[in-house]
Image: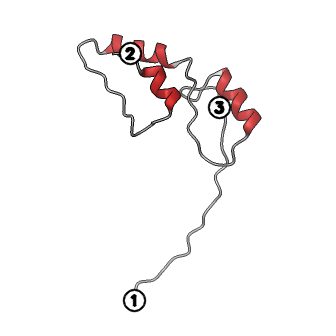
Amino acid sequence: MASHEAVQVKQMTPVRDREAPGSTEKIDRLLAAKRPGFPCLVIDLDVVPAKYSSLRTSFPDATIFYAVKANPAPDALAANADRT
C-alpha cells in the first residue's frame, strides 16, 4: 500500500499590486468597490484599442485573431470588432 502524506492547504489572499500587468486606476476603483471574493477577469475596455494598436505595430505582417470562445462578452467583442 502506498503511504499518504497529509497536505497542508492555505487559503490564498488576493494581492492588489499597482504594478500588476494591465492594472489601471479604473480597475483598481472597481475592485475596491466590488471586492469580489473569488478570482475574476477584469478588463478596462478603454485600454483595448491602444493594446491592439501596440500589438499590430509589433507584428505588422501578422494576421491578428480574437478568441471569442475565451471571452465572448459583448462589450469585449464590440471593443475589438472594427480592428482588423
Expressed as whole percent of the image width and height from the top left, the position of residue 39 reads 60, 46
What residue type is disc 2 on?
Arg
- Which amino acid type is shown beneath numbered disc 1? Met
Label 3 neighbourhood size at 10 Å, few (<14), some (14-19), many (20+)?
Answer: few
Quick one: SS at disc 3?
Answer: loop
Residue 17 numbered mark, or none: 3
Q: Which residue is mark 1?
A: 1
Closest to the observer, 16 or 2: 16
Of discs 2 and 1, which sits in the foreground?
A: 2
- The Cα–Cα distance between marks 2 and 3, rounded to whole angstroms, is 30 Å
Q: Going 45% across and 27% down the picture, which residue do you hit?
A: 77
Given contact means CB atoms under 8 Å apart, are the residues at marks 2 and 3 in contact?
no
**In screen coordinates, is 37 left or right of 39?**
right
Nearer to us: label 2 or label 3: 2
Circle 2 SS class: loop
Report the residue at 51% width, 76% height from top.
5
Q: Quadrant of the C terminus?
A: top left
Q: Position of residue 21 (x, y in %)?
A: 53, 28
Front position among marks 1 and 3: 3
Residue 23 against residue 69 in the figure, above or below: above
Q: Amino acid at mark 3?
A: Asp
Q: Earlier in the sequence, mark 2 or mark 3?
A: 3
Quarter of the figure with the N terminus: bottom left
Position of residue 55 measured from the top left corner of the image (x, y, whole percent): 37, 17
- The quarter holding residue 22 reads top right
- Circle number at residue 83: 2
CA gap between label 1 and label 3 equals: 46 Å
Residue in view at x 76 percent, y 34 percent = 33
Nearer the observer, 73 or 58? 73
Q: Earlier in the sequence, mark 1 or mark 3?
A: 1
Q: Where is residue 71 drawn, in percent x and y? A: 45, 36
Q: Residues within 10 Å of mark 1 (few under 14, many from 20)?
A: few
